[in-house]
Amino acid sequence: MNFEELGIEDRLLRAITEMGFEKPMPVQEQVLPLLLTHETDLVALAQTGTGKTAAFGLPAIQRLDLQSPATEVLILSPTRELCLQIAKDLKQYSKYVDGCSVVAVYGGASIDVQKKEVQKGAKIIVATPGRIHDMVRRRFVDLSQVKVTVLDEADEMLDMGFKDDLDAILEQTPDTKNTWLFSATMPDEVARIAKGYMNNPQEITVGTRNSGAQNVKHCYYLVQAKDRYLALKRIADYNPNIYAIIFCRTRTETQEVATALIRDGYNADALHGDLSQPQRDHVMNRFRCKNLQMLVATDVAARGLDVSNLTHVINYNLPDEIEVYTHRSGRTGRADKTGISIAIVNLREKHKIKKIEAIIKKKFEQLPIPTGMEVCQKQFFNMIHRVEHVDVNYDEINPFIGEVVKQLEWMDKEELIRRFVSIEFNRFLEYYRNAPDLNVKEKEERKAIEKKAKSTVHDDSGMARLIINLGYKDKIQPQRLIGMINDRCRDTKIKIGKIDISELFTYIDVDGNYANDIIEAFHGESYRGRPLIVQAAKSKRKDKDERRREEKEFRKQRNEHQQRNSHDDYPRSHKKDKKRPDERSRGDRKKHR
Ligand code: ADP
Ligand code: MG
């Protein structure tokens, strides 16, 4: 069936044809005939990038009564970016529909300007819940004539705690309106809440519920937690033409990774909620027009965004909620293109891959992290490719070329190529020469963890005693230690008992059931560049001898570490190294994580 047969009217048809929509996507095929002819509530679930915007946008426009000035359609979306994107899409669809005014209403921009726009007449309002609620409260908008409300990315809105806003907004709309809910995923709990907004909704699910995009390849790299950032750089360097979103878990992490990438000479920037609206717009614009290669973002900031032709989606850290992965990977492989979704995981997180596989019903492929030489090779051939395809401005160059040819006459062709390529290539070669292997030797690592955990001693109360190589010399405080544990064992609430800080190390009593989890969680981590050691304390009671032995051991380790790092075999002051600091300089590694 084509769009016309599904009941789309001519003026919309004309616009979408111009946009390159030739035939309807599956969700459109199912949703359009229903919404164009029936007054019904609807829950539509379809993977990301399958054209849900048009599935609700086209019927919403077509059902407007253009004789009346009232607002008839209210579309709610979780973020400002998505709101702007939907508004833009709807404006395009309705290009040939006179009087179809679409107004975007979102936080972080002038409410007065938006009020004026709405009051000039808005047939369709696309809004974020917070701002439209504000406008409702201040009576800047009249929603009493609304016929259709759309909840796009409904689960995210409910997840973000917009429920109260939604309730207040929807209260202002007539009971007779239809509510259409669109999302890629719908966890059961959210589904239950969402049903409360609807009467007998029709349900349309395209593909398997909560399934991921079909044309996305999923792979993961296994690294030590401390090497996460280095692995990211490898991936970026191995894919010189990368155009990717890198997902982080928190705003802080997002900013840290972006800052580190920028400092290391990559074309990257951050998108998260701590940025002002103009900053976010600026970043998004640069990214959309590909002036930016890597966008480091939080889930919320990037939900629903439609950026075409992404080569990769990178999970710098896997999301806490596994379902979020579907949304992330759905940013690539959109509208029939193929894409790659990468997860960077450590041993402890590997089990999450299994869980995700169960949800998306697809297998991940484990890939080895490219070695330094592999990266160099890739870069080398990429440079040659660039030489082959570069635009040459003959007119401007010709006046000098004679003299240059003469000057280089003594070189043969091969030597010439070597030299031109070296201009760029040396940077990579220097950086990657002797670069460490970042791949985790899984068996060996597991053994090492087991050894550390071996003698976890439980006392009667079920608490076990761990020892960590941080002490008051590191200015470490109990709160910070507890924070570090919670950070790394996010899925569980672990009881922590007595914390006994010495100069170089600390004893911590923890719930015996989780002692080994904690040991595993800290394995391969570092603190201010020094490898962190968390292991079972040898004795249950801290007798003096044992304490002295521990002290001696940790002092030795510390000294060894210092010695190893005092003579750095890398020329760090070298100009080119500044751009991409040496992987083995451990100085501020902490920042990189
Ligand atoms: P979703 O909301 O399901 O994640 P979008 O509505 O953002 O997906 O659409 C993804 C991309 O597919 C957009 O760039 C959109 O323009 C394009 N698209 C939608 N429908 C069609 C179609 N029928 N033919 C070609 N491209 C389409
Ligand atoms: Mg969408």
Image (spheres, rainbow, N blue to C red):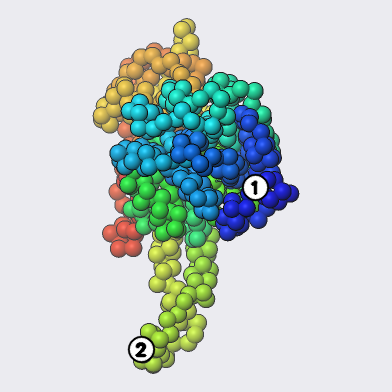
Specify the label residue 466 is tagged with.
Answer: none
Q: Please provide percent x and percent y for residue 185.
A: 59, 33
Q: Is residue 93 above or below residue 146?
A: below
Q: What is the C-alpha distance between the residues marked 1 and 2?
A: 60 Å
Task: Determine if residue 172 is in view.
Answer: yes
Mark 1: amino acid:
Ile
Q: Look at the image and tell me in which quarter the C terminus lies.
A: top left
Q: Secondary structure at mark 2?
A: helix
Q: Earlier in the sequence, mark 1 or mark 2?
A: 1
Left-right relation of 264 to 390: left
Instruction: Identify the residue at image location x=35%, y=26%.
Output: 137
Evaluate whether residue 257 shows in this view: no
* Total numbered circles: 2
Quick check: 477 left or right of 151? left
Q: Is residue 441 above or below residue 2?
A: above
Q: Nearer the viewer, residue 357 or 323?
A: 323
Q: Position of residue 389 (x, y in %)?
A: 51, 74
Residue to which mark 2 is pinned: 400
How far across and how far down the image is residue 526, in percent? 39, 37
Taking the spot 51% from the left edge, 53% from the top edge, the residue there is 95
Badge 2 amino acid = Phe
Nearer to us in this view, 1 or 12 = 12
Query: In the figure, residue 168 lies in which quadrant?
Result: top left
Q: Position of residue 323 (x, y in %)?
A: 57, 33
Residue at 44 percent across and 64 percent down: it is 429
State the SS at label 1: loop
In-front residue for pair 435/246 = 246
Q: Write down the residue under mark 1.
A: 8
Asked if residue 383 lies left or right of residue 11, the reply is left
In the figure, 363 relative to 337: above or below?
A: above
